[in-house]
Image (cartoon, rainbow, N blue to C red):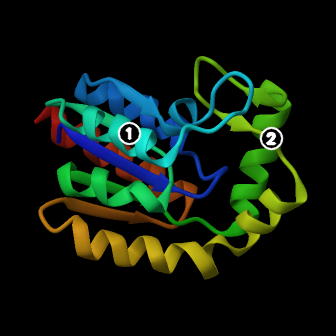
């Protein structure tokens, strides 16, 4: 376990889990929101965003967290471990509310969290399991053929997986 792709809806816990995993495997963590958006909320052009990810996944060890289904195959093809946080919408919305209370809005430089909440984003989160999750599962099935894949559907499962991975790494 040296190359971990962590995928999930906003508010699912990707940032927290990615930091824990990075410490566990002694690898750098990349928050794709911090790559995609600059300080003025401008987005990276698609070809540059894909090229940045190609460069990231060429490293021998990494943890990359983010959804971005359009470039997900880049990460999946190189990952040896894939964790898909497929949590219910209300859990993700609660996670977003907690993050907003903790950090406020905007780009958090230390976590890469892009926190700009609007109705479009809330609708996206609410419909994620119906619209995006099937696409993500298909991409995982198609591109992560050599990886250990973990689909996590609750915070409890996320904690249990982290405990299991810590025990496996310690052995």
Q: Earlier in the sequence, mark 1 or mark 2?
A: 1
Residue 116 numbered tag: 2
| Residue 19 in the image, given as x and y percentages of width and height | 44, 29
| Residue 13 in the image, given as x and y percentages of width and height | 57, 46
Q: Secondary structure at mark 1?
A: strand
Residue 61 position by quadrant: top left
Residue shown at 18% from the left, 30% from the top: 59
Count neighbours of disc 2 (C-alpha within 10 A) and say few if under 14, some if 14 to 19, many if 20 or more: few
Residue shown at 83% from the left, 31% from the top: 105
Q: Is residue 120 above or below residue 14?
A: below
Q: In the current view of this chain or complex, which residue is farthest to the right?
A: 119
Residue 169 numbered tag: none
Q: Is residue 76 left or right of residue 8?
A: left
Q: Is residue 116 left or right of residue 77?
A: right
Quarter occupied by the C terminus: top left
Residue shown at 36% from the left, 35% from the top: 52
Q: Secondary structure at mark 2?
A: loop
Q: Is residue 9 above or below residue 53?
A: below
| Residue 37 in the image, given as x and y percentages of width and height | 62, 33
Q: Is residue 146 left or right of residue 143?
A: left
Q: Is residue 3 left or right of residue 9?
A: left
**Residue for badge 1:** 64
Residue shown at 80% from the left, 41% from the top: 116
Q: Is residue 46 above or below residue 166?
A: below
Q: In the depicted view, which residue is nearer to us: 147 or 87? A: 147
């Amino acid at each position: 376990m040296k190359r971990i792709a962590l995928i999930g809806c906003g508010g699912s816990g990707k940032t927290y889990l990615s930091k824990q995993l990075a410490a566990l495997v002694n690898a750098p963590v990349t928050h794709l929101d911090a790559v995609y958006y600059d300080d003025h909320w401008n987005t990276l052009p698609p070809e540059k965003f894909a090229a940045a990810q190609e460069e990231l996944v060429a490293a021998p060890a990494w943890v990359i967290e983010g959804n971005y289904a359009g470039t997900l195959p880049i990460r999946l093809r190189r990952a040896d471990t894939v964790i898909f946080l497929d949590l219910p919408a209300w859990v993700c919305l609660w996670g977003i509310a907690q993050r907003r209370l903790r950090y406020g809005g905007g780009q958090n430089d230390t976590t890469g969290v892009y926190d700009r909440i609007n109705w479009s984003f809330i609708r996206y989160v609410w419909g994620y399991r119906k619209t995006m999750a099937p696409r993500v599962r298909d991409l995982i099935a198609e591109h992560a053929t050599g990886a250990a894949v973990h689909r996590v559907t609750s915070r409890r499962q996320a904690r249990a997986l982290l405990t299991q991975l810590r025990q496996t790494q310690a052995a």
